[in-house]
Image: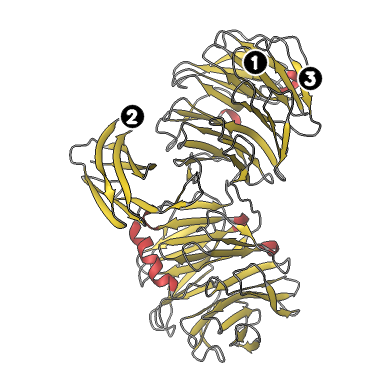
Amino acid sequence: MDTMKNFIVFFSLISLFNTGFSQWNLQCPFPPNPVHDIEFYDQYRGWMISGSQVLITSDGGYSWQIHPTGVSVPLYSMDFSDDENGWIVGYEGLILNSNDGGLTWDEQTSGTGYQLVSVHFDNDQVGWIGCHNGSSGKILHTTDGGESWQTQYDLADGTIYQLFFLNSQFGWAVGKYGVAMKTEDGGITWNEPESFTEEILKSVYFVDESNGWIVSLEGSIYHTSDGGDNWELQAFYQNSYLSGIYFTDLLNGYISGNGQIFMTNDGGANWIISSLGPGSFYDIYFFDSDKGWAIGSSNGINGKLYRTDDGGETWELKSNSQIYPLFDICFVSEEIGWTAGGAGEIMFTDDGGYTWTPQNSPAWMEWYSLCFVDEQKGWICGGWSTGTGQIIHTSDGGNTWAIQHNDQGTWFKSIFFVDKNNGWAGRRNGEIYRTIDGGLNWNMINTGAEGIIESIYFVNSLKGWAVSSSAEILISEDGGNTWTLQYDEYGQLNSVFFIDEEIGWAVGDYKNLHTIDGGNNWEVQYYGGQLNDVVFSDPDNGYAVGDYALLTTIDGGETWMEEEYYTPHELFAISAVGSRCWISGNWGLIINKGTSEITIIIDPINSKFVDFSYSLYPNPANNKCCINFNLLIESHINIDIYNLSGVLIDNVLNKKMKKGEHHVYWNIPNKSSGIYFCNLTVNGKTISKKLVVVD
């Protein structure tokens, strides 16, 4: 892919490769899969389950990090008894347990193949699980933290969809065929009141031992004031598919439905409806009377996440959903970037990829390649396989796009501009279109190649290379007026990249090529899979992405190391600027990596960035760990080290620091090996990072 990688990338990736322990963060689609549960321990630390993954936040939900669970099946419900001990239940009897705040997960044995759909723990030992097989249900119980589970109740006719416990004794269970049960002895006995409905009861919530509510998939809201012995219909909303309920007190409550949030401030006598667009909400959760979350799916594939900070008066979309492939991505600064792909999709970010805004596309076609030379001027090319091809241009950062060139002969596959005037666009049959006036006029040049020109790269206005789908490499030394064949073998090449006029790489199907003499000679470097894009920072260090692979090399491409990025999608393109790197892929995927695990915090009061970065190196550490951070303003810094039990081990720093980069060392000669947490607080806002100490 041919984004603006010249000039910027050479310096930008050096720090990425020297970082060592930074990780890839998912930016889009976010959340990656439908969200079934969310929970917060305090105003900062929380968890969310999305598909088969766990996402953790330490800043109140403004940013999330993916933590793998080791499973690939759907997860349905989660509960933490404290900030360390948590359980997740899911598909066909799956139980996961964490004792380190969700960082790692171990499987527990449930003894059943039922779908486990609801879990609640009263403390780190005593818990319950509700489950079903579609026609019958069970309630499982443990008194040893999940080491063993016993069937506490068998339901022959009906299913259990949710459990709710007010305390260790009082609990309720609801499900299919109007199942609504109650226990007053911790589940030793369960009592079923006289049937009041045959509906599918999805969720139950009690604020005390007397007052509670139940919602049904059919749209009914039921209320009880006698602990569930009797239920009365409070409201009915047809086709609303009610699924989640939460009350912050006796009067104020919230219900989630089919793209809607229902809110009451009079105990359910009246409900105010907020419509929040397409998709379904599965549940709703409030940390306090103001801060709440509505979770679900936008399209059955990606997650849907809304947040309120004013008790439900307004809701802010915190998710971004995308199902089309994003074939290319281009950043011109650490904040400003664009991505484009299938079905005419063009998106823009001005906060480093944390949020993406769709831009109006002049055509509904496949956009294969894009290039920006600054924050205003950019070009995109694409087309349809049926023959229509277009080049579009913006001079206002993508607010408006205009068609510069329209061709009924074939589509365009690659585009590259070295400055605001000189650009090239490649298409099939070895044809390259050239402009010297910013795209106002394009001249077609037949390079003599047979394949589709998949990628073009120029190091200046005169010297550049192009690769084709027939594994051809061409060079031009006169601005693209004439081209000479340098390499022609079997297979396909997808991307070409040079760090100067001599050293470059070309990648494609099952091969990686390398040259140190401007392409006069190409050395074959093999990798067992398809590579779509390549970027290098110097002769040794580079990234390549491709068929479900994210690779790094430190020896110029002779060997490649695979990095984890926690998503099974094909990767198409790379863009890097300054200290950060972005990759786009199939199903709307965007992942990001920053030097030294840069963390951007958003002030929840005024939504402004609190500018500082923070990293630990090395990690794992032996006898010393360097804590690196960068302040854009003078700030008060406090650094504390805690062990896994939450005990303060050491205060490393507590003072006002000037603007700029700082390196503070924690000497750890007498600490036992294990997991620790480094809490760095800047002007009252804290970020916690895990630190592993080894002998």
- Quadrant assignment for the C terminus: top left
- Residue 152: image x %, image y %? 58, 13
> For the image shown, how many numbered marks are present on the structure?
3
Disc 2 target residue: 645
Q: Tell me the crowding category of disc 1: few under 14, some 14 to 19, or many 20 or more residues within 10 angstroms, Cα based.
A: some
Q: Tell me the crowding category of disc 3: few under 14, some 14 to 19, or many 20 or more residues within 10 angstroms, Cα based.
A: few
Disc 1 target residue: 211
Disc 3 target residue: 198
Residue 450 vs 413, above or below: the answer is below
Q: Secondary structure at mark 1?
A: loop
In the rendered structure, are the residues bearing label 3 and label 1 in contact, judged by CB atoms less than 8 Å apart? no
Is residue 468 in view from this perspective?
no
* Residue in front for this viewpoint, 266 or 480: 266
Is residue 574 in view from this perspective?
yes
Instruction: Work out which residue is located at the far left of the displayed protein and give it.
Output: 669
- Quadrant assignment for the N terminus: bottom right
- The disc, 1 or 2, on the residue closer to the chain's N-terminal end is 1
In the rendered structure, are the residues bearing label 1 and label 2 in contact, judged by CB atoms less than 8 Å apart? no
* Residue in front for this viewpoint, 276 or 644: 276
Q: Which amino acid type is shown beneath numbered disc 3?
A: Glu
What is the distance, in whole Å, between disc 3 and disc 1 at their CAs?
Answer: 22 Å
Left or right? Give the position of 134 relative to 153: right
Left or right? Give the position of 20 relative to 213: left
Q: Residue at x 63, y 10 (%)?
A: 190
- Residue 242: image x %, image y %? 72, 31
- The disc, 3 or 2, on the residue closer to the chain's N-terminal end is 3
* Residue in front for this viewpoint, 424 or 373: 373
Q: Which amino acid type is shown beneath numbered disc 2?
A: Ser
Q: Residue at x 53, y 38 (%)?
A: 48
